[in-house]
Image (cartoon, rainbow, N blue to C red):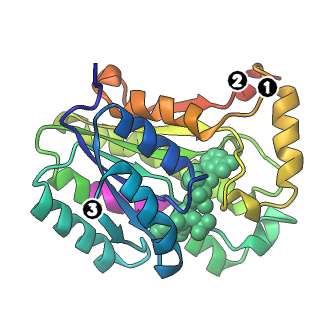
Amino acid sequence: GQLMAGKRGLVMGVANNRSIAWGIAKACASQGAEIALTYQGDALKKRVEPLAADLGTKLVLPCDVTDASSIDAVFETLKKEWGELDFLVHAIAFSDKNELDGRYVDTTEKNFTQSMLISCFSFTALAQRAEKLMPNGGSLLTLTYYGAEKVMPHYNVMGVAKAALEASVRYLAADLGRNNIRVNAISAGPIKTLAAAGIADFRYILRWNEYNSALRRNVSIEDVGGAGLYLLSDMSRGVTGEVHHVDSGYHIQG
Ligand code: 0WD
């Protein structure tokens, strides 16, 4: 059967074919979902357009989440093209690379604010718009990391932003539950993507996770895609406010 037949979703945060958002988009499309993609800036447009073609979608829209009018434009297009929306994937984060190294205590106000805006508040900003297009319910999904729960080397301000993001998943789930809109996060193990390349010693983190996780391997974007498919489909209809670990069981290890 097709788990996502008749469902339409917006997937934000595809930068290239290694992006976690791409793993989730592929999994949903393979089960019959219709998907719209957004990209940030013209440099990524060239990367994302062929991926959109693979999914058979013409809806490839620019969106920078620091610009409220560009978010509004995306939702205006979706309203015009689709009328309603069934799911949304937020796979967006940013911090100044210079602060994903060294000590958290040295974080600047400017980068703290910017990291929180792009990596945390943007999910709430999207939920505000998505709610209006989900009169019959829906599923919202974001991506987080274990650095929200425990101190991880070099994750620094991003760990603080992810902690706030995970808390916002719970508050959004509580607010939107009466409209049958579910809100969940996947806490993914480390994956070598464009964003991850900005974190100091990332190769070491990958190896550490491989050796110390229950499954003794790293996760792939397809692994995250499978969990995303579950959380975005009706298979998870009783699940909301959850932070679901897709990390080869790393978080259970002492
Ligand atoms: O190990 C990892 N890769 C993990 C990533 C482990 C656990 C969680 N995550 C999270 C990330 O923190 C992020 O929230 O998964 C999400 C997706 O990240 P990704 O797939 O690892 O990274 P990438 O393929 O680079 O996509 C993230 C994209 C940006 O890419 P770049 O590398 O150009 O910053 O987020 C987008 C952008 O496309 N993005 C924005 N989109 C709209 N407006 C903005 C913005 N202002 N800033 C970044």
Of mark 2 and mark 1, the one earlier in the sequence is: 1
**Label 1 to label 3: alpha-carbon separation:** 40 Å
Query: Mark 1 — residue?
Result: 213
- Residue drawn at x 67%, y 61% is 194
Query: Where on the image, by quarter, is ligand 1?
Result: bottom right
Count of marks overlaid on the render:
3
Mark 2–mark 3 contact, CB under 8 Å?
Answer: no
Front label number (2 vs 3): 3
Q: Which residue corresponds to mark 2? A: 249
Quarter of the image for residue 193 reads: bottom right
- Amino acid type of disc 3? Lys
Task: Please tell me how crowded label 2 is: few (under 14), some (14-19), or many (20+) other residues with Cα within 10 Å.
Answer: some
> Where residue 114 sits: x, y (%)?
57, 74
Q: Is residue 219 above or below residue 1?
A: below
Answer whether residue 131 is magenta in the image.
Answer: no
User: Label 3, on which residue?
Assistant: 58
Point out residue 190 in the picture as x, y percentages from the top left corner: 71, 43
Which of 230/164 is in front?
230
